[in-house]
Amino acid sequence: MDKHNISVGLDIGTTKIVAMIGRKNEYGKVEILGVGKSKSMGVHRGVVNNITQTIQSIQQAVQEAEAAASEKIEEVTVGIAGQHIRSLQHSDYVTRANSELVIDEDDIDRLINQVHKLVMLPGEEIIHVLPQEFKIDGQGEIKEPVGMYGGRLEANFHVVVGQVSSIRNIGRCVKSSGLQLEGITLEPLASANAVLSQEEKEAGVALIDIGGGTTDLAVFKDGIIRHTAVIPFGGNVITEDIKEGCSIIEKQAELLKMKFGSAWPGENKDNEIVSIPGLRGREPKEITLKNLSKIIHARVVEIIEQVYVEIKNYGHEEQKKKLIAGIVLTGGGSQLKHLKQLVEYITGMDTRIGYPNEHLAGDSDEDIASPLYATAVGLVMDGLKRQDRKKAEEVLEDVIDADEELTLETEEDIIQAPIKERRSFLDKLTERVKDFLDNAE
């Protein structure tokens, strides 16, 4: 099988590590060939805190995926999240030497590189610089400035910042697991690609990805990402609260949450009781489902309110910034019963659960189309996109090397001519992480 058509997403989460192998089928949909899942041992709130355990967990997930797909994994696209991620808005401009020439990619690159020179806090590095909209000579609301005339090129940027050490630690874990780092992607962006439609991104939508250790937020409007945030709470704190509140062990608390948990206390009657076996010959414990859902409700409300503060920070109450498509919930934590109703009640916004099935091939396993795998599916899609871009660049280079004149005579030729895409900063960051790891050997 052609290695180039296969992409592997590696989702390093707080509770689980998922390795997913996929390829594009003839209809342009993603066909999942194999999935491996292991318990995440060395990650806390999205940040690696034990390299050895994380490497073991990655290897276990990768081996499982390899066995399921009968494929050897060499390169992976890794998701990055964690409590160290923050974002900010920034405006910048460049003055062009010759306004008689049209604006090209180099002008935009120069502007983006200027943003990369922003002074960050010690130990922090810019991960993404995402242009929002451009202004040329004071004329605003321009989405694509290439090909236009003008002397002063301005833009508003959404800048995502993270800790260098955390990014390098993830790189080290991947490399020590015997894998090559193909790319790094911000996890909220990967999840968004997997579960949101283009219409929702245009209309305005907030994606809330509730993971084990963190809750990620990505806000889109007019098809552009406007705000990102990582809240250092997830499903694990709910489990922790149940463990403390009911005086039971963590394994039992997790099972209780998944089987009987509800985010809405009014749903349970007072006489509904669940019995939990005691430890080593002790009496079994009886817990009322009403108390259980009260514990869950208190913590879930706290998480949603923090996310809602971030949505307000984006400014969704302004008419121009209104999120018409409301909220989409995804991630393992979104499977909690009655969570959708609670989110609608707190925020007053339309809410749905996001499944990553829109981009998957029709015969995909039902389990893979679960919100649990949204990030992994997004990472596979990202890897496939990166490969398409590489192919297009190679084709373009071959054409240039052969020194053939490109004569685009028909509209069809124009469509088929490969466009050299601007390399995203994440591609450059991936290379820098690779260089750093090679030099650290």
Image (cartoon, rainbow, N blue to C red):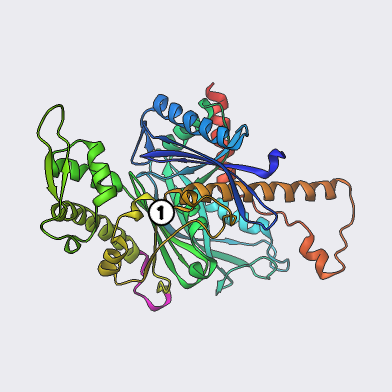
Q: Which quarter shows the N terminus?
A: top right
Q: Residue at x 43, y 48 (%)?
A: 161
Q: Which quarter shows the C terminus?
A: top right
Q: Which residues are magenta?
A: 314-320
385 relative position to 36: left or right: right
Residue 199, position as x, y percentages in the image: 52, 70
Count up the numbered dots. Answer: 1
- Magenta stretch holds residue 317: yes
Instruction: Relative to 394, say whether 262 is above or below.
Output: below
Mark 1 element type? strand
Residue 430, position as x, y percentages in the image: 56, 39
Instruction: Relative to 281, say whether 47 is above or below.
Output: below
- Magenta stretch holds residue 214: no
Residue 370, position as x, y percentages in the image: 44, 52
Q: Residue at x 52, y 50 (%)?
A: 365
Residue 208, position as x, y percentages in the image: 38, 58
**Which kind of residue does numbered mark 1 sit on?**
Ser
237 relative position to 159: left or right: left
What is the quadrant of residue 436 in the picture? top right
190 relative position to 339: left or right: right
Residue furthest out toward the top: 441
Can you see residue 305? yes
Q: Which residue is mark 1?
A: 87
